[in-house]
């Protein structure tokens, strides 16, 4: 069959039309397979999910444009960031909550900006003018939120608090316990006991 494609003729007769029919049949067979249709459907659902994503930390974000900016560099960034503000905030939350970027204890703002695919300067501007907390506080809040989700899924039934603190991205268990109590007003074991009663 390969000589049909190469020369187009075999023994003086053209078989090009046969190869064209076979190619069309294979093309439509591949196009209409469940895997191809599933991947297309999966990608549409991913895009749809991004559009319907509700902000978890809505109370941390400041969307107003009544910001007095006196820094020349920030004034240059203002137009670029403000025009994409809601998209940036949505990206930050999706990356933090669905991709668990902050489980890495050494993740920096630069690393996070790279994973988001936006310049670090835009992320700095976002946290400076459109967030009620700085990047470090946001990272801590997301990690505690992650720890709460893990506790609610039964993580502490089989693991230790130290293991939970590591999994959530804290470099020390003491920092984790302090942050957890600061945000939830209870320690992880007490929270776990509350979850078990529910």
Image (cartoon, rainbow, N blue to C red):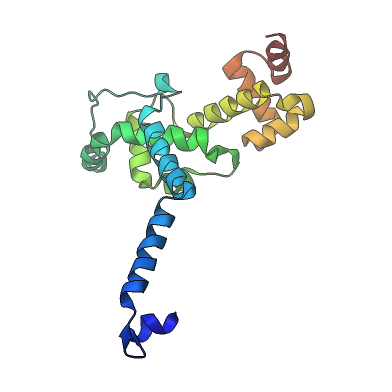
- Residue at 41% over, 85% down: 3
**Residue 71 shown left or right of residue 92 in the figure:** left
Which quadrant is home to the N terminus? bottom left
Residue placed most toward the observer, 52 or 91: 52
Residue placed most toward the observer, 78 or 72: 78
- Residue at 38% over, 37% down: 47
In the image, residue 128 lies at what x, y percent?
Answer: 36, 32
In the image, residue 189 lies at what x, y percent?
Answer: 73, 18
**Residue 102 shown left or right of residue 161 in the figure:** left
In the image, residue 150 lies at what x, y percent?
Answer: 65, 27
In the image, residue 60 lies at what x, y percent?
Answer: 41, 22
Residue placed most toward the observer, 12 or 151: 12
Q: Quadrant of residue 84?
A: top left
Residue placed most toward the observer, 195 or 57: 195
- Residue at 24% over, 32% down: 69
Instruction: From this view, report whether residue 62 is shown above or below residue 87.
Output: above
């Amino acid at each position: 069959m390969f000589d049909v494609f190469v020369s187009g003729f075999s023994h003086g007769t053209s078989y090009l039309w046969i190869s064209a029919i076979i190619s069309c049949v294979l093309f439509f067979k591949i196009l209409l397979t469940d895997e191809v249709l599933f991947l297309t459907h999966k990608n549409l659902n991913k895009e749809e999910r991004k559009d319907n994503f509700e902000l978890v930390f809505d109370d941390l974000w400041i969307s107003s444009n009544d910001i007095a900016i006196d820094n020349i560099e920030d004034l240059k960034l203002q137009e670029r960031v403000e025009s994409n503000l809601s998209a940036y905030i949505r990206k930050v939350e999706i990356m933090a909550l669905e991709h668990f970027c902050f489980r890495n204890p050494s993740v920096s703002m630069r690393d996070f900006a790279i994973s988001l695919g936006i310049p670090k300067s835009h992320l700095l501007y976002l946290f400076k003018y459109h967030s009620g907390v700085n990047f470090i506080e946001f990272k801590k809040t997301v990690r505690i939120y992650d720890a709460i989700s893990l506790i609610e899924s039964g993580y502490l039934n089989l693991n230790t608090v130290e293991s939970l603190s590591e999994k959530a991205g804290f470099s020390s268990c003491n920092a984790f316990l302090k942050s957890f109590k600061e945000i939830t007003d209870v320690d992880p074991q007490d929270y776990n006991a509350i979850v078990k009663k529910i």
